[in-house]
Amino acid sequence: MVLDFESMLRKLQADGPKVIAVGAAEDRDVLLSVEEARQLGIARAILTGNKEKIKAIARENGIDPANYTIVDELDAAQACLTAVNLVRRGEAALPMKGFVDTSVMLKAVLNKELGLRGTGLISPVGILKVSGFDRLFFVSDSAMTIAPDLKAKADIIRNAVKVARAFGLDQPKVAVLCAVEKVNEKMPATVDAQTLTEMNERGEITGCLVKGPLQLDNAVSPEAARHKGITHPVAGNADILITPDIQAGNILNKSMEYFARADKAGVIMGAKKPIILTSRASSDRAKLLSIAVGLLVAGEE
């Protein structure tokens, strides 16, 4: 079982490097992250984008461009499509977003002819290591589906479960978060949470244990769960935190990162391959860890 990011990196080093294709790679943090991945021996990168800018930024940051295959493409959208198509053709294992809007990369992924469109919902999964906890947390959805309906929430859970299981969690514990832990017809999210729990019990959502509605405190704190008299196995021990909408997910994710100083990675699930896709504001460390998560998940598929 992979309990932290350092053990994840060691596992990938033992497995040997895989090839990733970066769309619109002309960015300092992107290049620093792929260079560290190269030096660690977990990945080799094909870089697509403005070749001269990529080489200049690389040299400014002590990176030798000769260590990379660079595909010259001045248009950012085309650079992303080229990176995705390299994966589709089997020349790279995974695509990675460079310095470009998420929507541009996703449009390339969903391209009918050259992309990696899957059959399910595409959703992000954040992986965070918070000080004081003995496990990683998997958080979704914080960036894509604005107001997921019941079906979308079920798919969001399934995508998060795939990531958690790649970390060695055979039966990850899923908390469906709400503002209260009791079903209230005036709060539709609590009704959905109860239904998702029942779907899990009926075998419609598999490979995990689901409980909702739960508040955040009684999802992650055994003491808070005991105080409320909640005895379900997920209560206080959740691995996966499913939020009711994009606003709650985004605030939770960024609160963990900025207030709790959590180490963070992220991956997009639901396409034919995991997508390495982080915020343009993310550090090179977060980008490196996201590369590693993508490789780990892909290796388990």
Image (spheres, grey):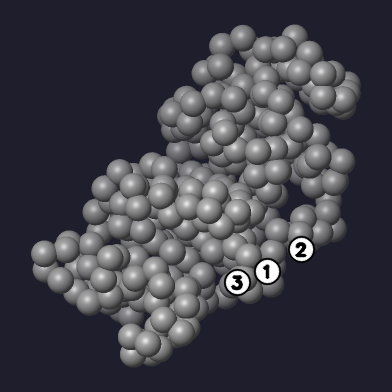
Q: Is residue 259 above or below residue 117?
A: below
User: Distance from label 1 to label 3 (Cα)?
Assistant: 10 Å
**Split into 4 quadrants, where in the image is the N terminus?**
bottom right
Q: How many marks overall?
A: 3
272 on left or right of 152? right
The residue lying at 48 percent from left, 52 percent from top is 255
In terms of image quadrants, where is residue 85?
Answer: top right
Q: Which mark is residue 133?
A: 3
Q: Is residue 205 visible?
A: no
Asked if marks 1 and 3 touch (Cβ < 8 Å), the reply is no
Query: Which structural element holds mark 1?
Result: loop
Kindly identify the amino acid type of the residue bearing the numbered disc 3.
Answer: Phe
Distance of label 3 from label 2 (alpha carbons): 16 Å
* Residue found at x 54% / y 49%: 258
Question: What residue is shown with label 1?
Answer: 3
**Residue at 39% in and 68% down:** 216
Given residues 210 and 118, the one toward you in this image is 210
Q: CA distance from mark 1 to mark 2?
A: 7 Å
Q: Nearer the viewer, mark 1 or mark 3?
A: 3
